[in-house]
Amino acid sequence: MQLSWGIQWLFWLAALAAVWASWGSGYSGSTPGFPQWQIDCLKMLPQHLKDHWRHHVGGLAMAGVFVLVALGLHLELANQWAYLLGGAGLMSLLASLPLSAATRGLLLVVVAYGVFSGWTDLTTLSLPLLASFSGLLLGKLWQLDDWDDLLLPGAWLVGLYWLTTSTLDNLLLPKISLLTVMLSVSLLLRGVQAVPAMKQVPRVVQVVFLVITGGLGAWLGVQNLLLQPTLLPWAGLFAGGIGLGMVLFHLADEPTGAASAEALPMPLQAGVMAFIGIGLAALLASRLFDTLAYTILAIGILSHQRLGRFGAVSVCFLLGRVLLQVFLQQYNTNVTGINIMHPYASAALYMGFGLMLLLPHGLNASQMTQHGNLKPEASASIQFPALAILWMSLIALGSAGFANYFLHVEATASLLLAFLVAGLGVGLLGTFKASQARSLPLVLTLLSQTGVLAIPEVLSWGNAADKNEKMLVLAGAFVLMLLAGLLAQRLASRRQPVQVS
């Protein structure tokens, strides 16, 4: 793709400013400052690597296993092994360094932009994008703290994936340029929020300033760099995403410092209001614009340095909605979408909601909250036993694809839709031991979506399978679910989580 020099310079300058501001402010903006904070963290690095080495290599090892499986089954995904291993390896490598999730996310989005912005043949871009995003997801499951390191590069990868698989040739470059401009303005806003003077401004004034500045910056970028007056309304959508992100943060009433380690009781009305707000925003974005609007809305929410418990859930939902639309466009011949009145589609909807509603209980039974003193302020990182992560990843990656052995493609899409909507409800209204776990149901949904999109051969196998093959797959699925249940029961019977200092 041949983006204009002005757009490329805008992105690199915005990324540089955001990385410098995030790096200099440490984790919370109230730390000793730059460079003393980095020096202190580097002193802790050897002990940190020694204590947590399993979690830093787990994602890369798991991605390697899936590459070997793809090679053994002669899947096309095996040809993209470098992107799958690269995504998981970068996520694991940066997680081993004393950096905040925001800084890791900024570095990852810079790498993702550098790798894919210079791609010449866009017709071959979709599978590398999916493989990279899948690698990031696998790596993130081993280090669940904040979600910026996954969602920032994820917004760029998913948005670009949608454009390269659905947009007409004459509109492809303008839409990619629009996506890049919005991402650049979002990064600039992150840098602005790190200015010390901004921390003294009242919240209401911050909201107004960010919405006006972000909307005006997006408008100027579209007007002067894209030279596409018809795309100017997208600046309003981006500004709306900024406002929505601030509203979601205030609804969650995110605490600061050590209190953020454990999930506080969430008022029901806050979760309901967030659920309604996200749904209305997604509806308006899709009706007034197109599927890319979900990504632009997510980028607007990501303009905030702190997403909060609801902000991360909303971005996961919006990115998942884009991936669902890709699946519908590529594999569902029903031009009206999903007919949930079909028996199989209705059954898949029922099964998807049921599994997602049960998921928080399994997560709470197996997760452990470990406290460390690497960060300048006390905080928490969710950890799961390695076997639990392996089972979660395996079931998530294969759930939608192998479900097609018993369902047709439209019913498989219905299953993905159930995962997505129920995951949003569970993330906003469910009870979790730690606040960061609220996004995990939707992260597993994203993994399920990327799995079925990156391995389309499984859909063909399901359509052509005879009764004996279907019975074998059913037996295998039953064994996996039984083992997952036994694992959850065993983990639930273990000792209570302990603090590690």
Image (cartoon, helix red, strand yellow):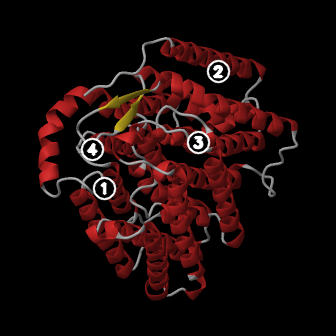
**Residue 209 visible somewhere in the drawing:** yes
Other-residue count near label 1 (Cα within 10 Å), few / some / many at <14 / 14–19 / ≥20:
many
The residue indicated by pointer 3 is 427
From the image, tell me which residue sits under label 4: 377
Query: Could you tell me which residue is drawn at 68 percent across and 65 percent down?
Result: 286
Classify residue 206 by image quadrant.
bottom left
Disc nearer the start of the sequence (1/4):
1
Q: Could you tell me which residue is drawn at 35 percent across and 21 percent down?
A: 498
**Between residues 139 and 79, which one lies in front from this camera angle?**
139
CA distance separating discs 4 and 3: 26 Å
Q: Are marks 1 and 4 in contact (CB under 8 Å)?
A: no
**Residue occupying the point 50% across, 62% down:** 246
Give the camera-side residue of 321 and 134.
Answer: 321
Q: Which residue is mark 1?
A: 107
Q: Is residue 123 visible?
A: no
User: Which label is found at residue 477?
Assistant: 2
Mark 4 or mark 2: whose residue is earlier in sequence:
4
Q: Quadrant of residue 111?
A: bottom left
The answer to whether the residue labelled 3 contacts the one labelled 1, judged by CB atoms less than 8 Å apart, is no
User: Cα distance, mark 2 to mark 1?
Assistant: 38 Å
| Mark 3–mark 2 distance (CA, rounded to whole Å) | 26 Å
Q: Nearer the viewer, mark 4 or mark 2?
A: 4
- Please state which amino acid type lies under the numbered disc 4: Glu
Looking at the picture, which amino acid does disc 1 mark? Leu
Q: Secondary structure at mark 1?
A: helix
Task: Give the answer, above or below, for where 234 lies relative to 499.
Answer: below
Q: How many C-alpha atoms fall within 10 Å of the one at disc 2: few (<14), some, or many (≥20)?
A: some
